[in-house]
Image (cartoon, grey):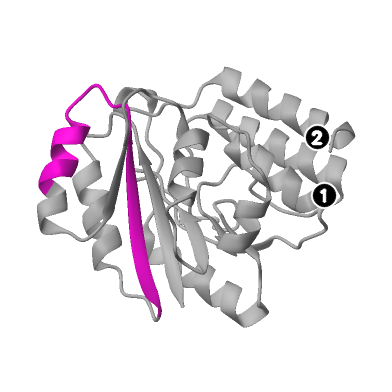
Amino acid sequence: MKLSIIIPAFNEENTIEEIIKRVENISLPIEKEIIVINDGSSDGTNKKLGQLKEEFNFILIEHKQNQGKGMAIRTCLSKATGDFVLIQDADLEYDPIDYQRLLDCALKNNAEVVYGSRNLNSKNKFSHLSFYLGGMVLTWMVNLLYGINITDEATCYKMFKTELLRSLNLICKRFEFCTEVTVKIAKRGIKIYEVPINYFPRHKKEGKKIKWKDGFLAAWILIKYKFVD
């Protein structure tokens, strides 16, 4: 078996080297494939990735212009050869040491989807109250509208069977990837398993990119897909 790890990167020159090293060094009982996409970065991310490519074994893709996290994931998905796909942000908010938890859950339960929940780990902190509340509202909305029971809709750590993710016909371009993929899975009646993960939040000054408008877009998608196939 193989796990494809997708890393979208946009202006992450300060963290991209460390996250690739962490992903490369993590030991798993199955083969892993690392796919990194430079999503039109305007800083030194592209140069760093070129240097890292000489040292580490990963697939490197480039968008000439920034197209957004959702589009970056979709581009990488077309190159993935693993049985499972996992999303890894290029910052250091999420720790690859938690891969094993998601993988164990997937293999033990023959699960098609496993989310790493920040809210199931009481030791975690959050960068700002607004981000925390926004995530909780979106989680409450998806549970209410689609009759599921998850604790962290907006988590980065989402693991899917590759064939399932490809079959969802995603159209997302930005951070709405999380919402679109969750509602399309929920509408198929597929169980989303969750495991607790660690979370090390960064602030806007450190490069956090998600904004309030992304939250409103996610809420709109939750409502729209309730009535549209």
Q: Identify the magenta region.
A: 30-51
On the image, the x and y values in percent for residue 82 come to 46, 66
What's the mark number on residue 187?
1
- Residue at 32% from the left image edge and 23% from the top image edge: 205
- Residue at 61% from the left image edge and 61% from the top image edge: 163
Residue under label 2: 225
- Quarter placement of the C terminus: top right
Q: Secondary structure at mark 2?
A: helix
What's the mark number on residue 214?
none
Estimate how packed mark 1 is, as few (under 14), some (14 to 19) or many (20 or more) residues with alpha carbons within 10 Å.
some
On the image, the x and y values in percent for residue 62 come to 30, 36
- Residue at 16% from the left image edge and 51% from the top image edge: 53
Q: Secondary structure at mark 1?
A: helix
Task: Give the vertical position of 165 relative to 103 (above or below).
Answer: above
Q: Are marks 2 and 1 in contact (CB under 8 Å)?
A: yes
- Residue 15: quadrant of the picture: top left
Q: Is residue 5 left or right of residue 45?
A: right
- Residue 178: quadrant of the picture: top right
- Residue at 41% from the left image edge and 40% from the top image edge: 201
Task: Give the vertical position of 46 relative to 216 (above or below).
Answer: below
Q: Magenta includes 48?
A: yes
Q: Magenta includes 128?
A: no
Q: Is residue 189 left or right of residue 15?
A: right
- Residue type, numbered disc 1: Lys
